[in-house]
Amino acid sequence: MTAKRRVYAETGAREYWIVDPMEETIDVLSRTEAGGFESRGALPKEDEVASQVLDGFTVRLADLLA
């Protein structure tokens, strides 16, 4: 995953999500002021998450894992 994180940083991605269907979790990583990424932590499928980049975009995690 480190290689992808580096590519996302180099291309200016502000946020990315890692979906783990085996663990049924989603990890949302957002760009920090220092240029790296900070994880919100692995969220369980029962949660709903809002993008910090796409205004008004929210997803029920269970829908992504269905």
Image (cartoon, rainbow, N blue to C red):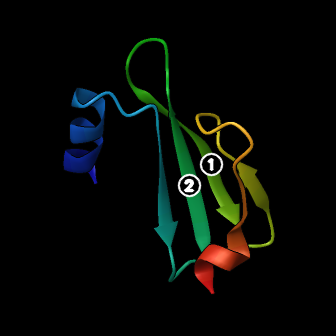
Image quadrant in which the C terminus is located = bottom right
User: Is 11 situated above or below 61?
Assistant: above
Mark number displayed over residue 41: 1
Give the amino acid type for the residue marked by disc 1 in the picture.
Gly
The 10 Å Cα crowd at callout 2, few under 14, some 14 to 19, many 20 or more, is some
User: Is 45 situated above or below 3?
Assistant: below
Q: Position of residue 46 (x, y in %)?
A: 80, 72
User: Which residue corresponds to the image point at 49% horizontal and 72% vertical from the top-left?
Assistant: 20
Say whether disc 1 or disc 2 marks the residue closer to the N-terminus: 2
Mark number displayed over residue 61: none
Of 16 and 26, the residue lying toward us: 16
User: Which residue corresponds to the image point at 78% horizontal and 60% vertical from the top-left?
Assistant: 48
Give the amino acid type for the residue marked by disc 2 in the picture.
Asp
In the rendered image, which quarter is residue 61 located in? bottom right
Does the residue at mark 1 contact the one at mark 2 (Cβ under 8 Å)? Answer: yes
- Relative placement, left or right, of 1 versus 56 is left
Image quadrant in which the N terminus is located = bottom left
The 10 Å Cα crowd at callout 1, few under 14, some 14 to 19, many 20 or more, is few
Of 53 and 4, the residue lying toward us: 53
In the rendered image, which quarter is residue 45 located in? bottom right
Circle 2 sits in a helix, a strand or a loop, which is it? strand
Mark number displayed over residue 27: 2
User: Is 62 situated above or below 50?
Assistant: below
Q: Position of residue 10 (x, y in %)?
A: 22, 28
Q: Position of residue 51 (x, y in %)?
A: 65, 43
Circle 1 sits in a helix, a strand or a loop, which is it? strand
Q: Position of residue 13 (x, y in %)?
A: 37, 34
